Amino acid sequence: MSAGPKRRAYYFSTRDLVLIAVVSAAGGVLSTYVGYLGSLMNKAVGVPFGAGQWMAGLHVFWFVFARAAVGRTGAATLAGVLKGLVEMFAGSTHGLPIVLVSLVEGLLVDAVLLPAGKRPSLGSMCLAGGVSSASNVLVFQALYFSGVSVGYVGLMTAFAFVSGAILGGYFARGVLDVVSSARVLNLDEEPEGAGRAPSFRVISTLVLAVLLAGGAVFYYTQVFEPFWTGPTCRVEGMVERSYEYRPIDFEDDSVTVTAELQGAVTYVPPTDYTGVPVASILERAHVQEPAEKVRIVASDGYYAIFDLDDLADRPEVILVQDKDTLRLVAAGYEGAYWVRMVSRIVVCADD
């Protein structure tokens, strides 16, 4: 009696593909939240760039986790492509290049963990997370080279590596231990050095997960504003008349300026931009005394603060339409002040 036909064995099982898809989608959707945490870190230490790289490991956590949970080379790369696409369509300010960044991060996770076997050890996961996270600094420098000193780039890369090792590798292993112990995931083979996970790792993982989840709930309910509502922003605060700014209502006030973006990461040569001066937008709102500052807020929570008097004297600081969003072109200011996806203009008494 002849044996029946053998079922074709696919490289990734249906379970693997579903897991990769879910993990990638979660990473893409939460990317703006991670960016917001990075911005808070930058503002906390008083620098526009660099310190936020301490949060960079949360971007690559998903790739390390997917590779370790699936146990096959290529899982991280696939997760990188999917996460990048989700992040792009979720409104990333980087657009299509974010797909390349995520792809490189995923590829590096797979490359570092290639000799680690089906279930990589804690040390190899930390190394993969660090290398992958550090790569985002170098890729962004290659895409948006701005002549930053080698020392500064090296410092940002070091921050990103440490973040990737902790938040990308160590945290991923902790989450894997927790979900495996809780039978949420049934692994065919335990990770190297597994057994009963140390109490410190379990406790630290749960505490960090709760903090991040709580912060995400606050961010998406209190801070984040959907970018897909169109090119509008709210003018509010210490004004007689709060209103919804729309470019079409200010066509007679539009001007064209030539501005050069000089940032720590991004450089754009002198370019012509057409938009409406922020001073004209504030004039229609009738600013009240004793207002002194203007906060330009993005939909992801990022913001830049200007002196009210400076804006009154700078008609070259304009709000331009950038596809379906608004972008601040701050001629004469460093790149950190060029806010993308502007959703609110808040007039206030101080910082």
Image (cartoon, helix red, strand yellow):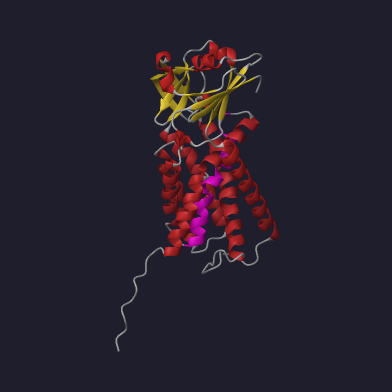
Asked if residue 18 is positioned above or below residue 326 in the image, the reply reads: below
Quadrant of the image containing the C terminus: top right
Viewer-nearest residue: 272 or 267: 272
Q: Position of residue 11 (x, y in %)?
A: 39, 64
Name the chief secondary structure element in magenta.
Answer: helix
Quadrant of the image containing the N terminus: bottom left
Viewer-nearest residue: 100 or 214: 214
- Which residue is rendered at x = 42% and y = 25% of the image? 321
Q: Position of residue 31 (x, y in %)?
A: 51, 43
**The magenta stretch spans which residues?**
48-71
Viewer-nearest residue: 320 or 66: 320
To which quarter of the image does residue 260 belong? top left
Does residue 70 show up magenta in the picture? yes
Residue at the extreme bottom? 1
Query: Is any atom of residue 146 visible in this view?
Result: no
- Which residue is rendered at x = 53% and y = 10% of the image? 313
Q: Position of residue 101 (x, y in %)?
A: 44, 42
Query: Is any atom of residue 150 visible in this view?
Result: yes
Residue at the extreme top? 313
